[in-house]
Amino acid sequence: MTGTRAYVCWQDMLARCHRESHRWFSHYGARGITVCEEWLSFENFYADMGDPPPGLSIDRINVNGDYEPGNCRWTTPAEQARNRRPFKPRRRRTSLAELQAYAAALARAASAPGSARTAP
């Protein structure tokens, strides 16, 4: 069964959860998402999930849960897009111009009359 869509899906699922070099490991294995012991065998995975229907791929019902029989299904990309963790808002990065303006303001404040501090 190697080379089938089900086998490739199973291999990729294992890699996301167990191989640190996988490009998506940080979203799966690093978060503690694992594959149940039963599904470490392709035969057991295939017995539970069968062949993926055309156009569908594996999805976890509980996005924070493991890959296991009660938490997986075959779904469309649209269904998977609705079943996601909420995105964390990213902080806006400071631009070089903003940093330069801030540094210039600090320099002006430091060189202004009366800005010199003396020890008590």
Image (cartoon, helix red, strand yellow):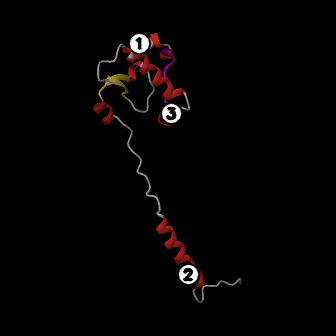
Q: Please provide the residue range marked out in magenta.
A: 31-38
Residue at horizontal 50 percent and vertical 26 percent from the top: 15
Q: Is residue 114 left or right of residue 79?
A: right
Instruction: Find residue 109 and name its label.
Output: 2
Mark 2 and mark 3 residues within 8 Å of each other at the beta carbon: no
Q: Which residue is mark 3?
A: 25
Instruction: Find residue 46 and name its label.
Output: 1
In the figure, 43 relative to 119: above or below? above
Residue at horizontal 55 percent and vertical 81 percent from the top: 108
**N-term-proximal mark, 1 vs 2:** 1
Q: Amino acid at mark 3?
A: Phe
Query: Can you name the residue that lies furthest to the right here?
Result: 120
Looking at the rendered structure, the secondary structure element under dot 1 is helix
Residue at horizontal 40 percent and vertical 32 percent from the top: 63
Q: CA distance from mark 3 to mark 1?
A: 23 Å
**N-term-proximal mark, 3 vs 1:** 3
Q: Amino acid at mark 2?
A: Ala
The rendered magenta stretch, by its main secondary structure, is classed as: loop
Give the quarter of the image for residue 2.
top left
Q: Position of residue 85 (x, y in %)?
A: 39, 39
Looking at the rendered structure, the secondary structure element under dot 3 is helix
Q: Nearer the viewer, residue 98 or 71?
A: 98
Task: Quarter of the image for the C terminus: give it.
Answer: bottom right
Q: Position of residue 44 (x, y in %)?
A: 45, 11
Please tell me whether residue 34 belongs to the stretch shown in magenta: yes
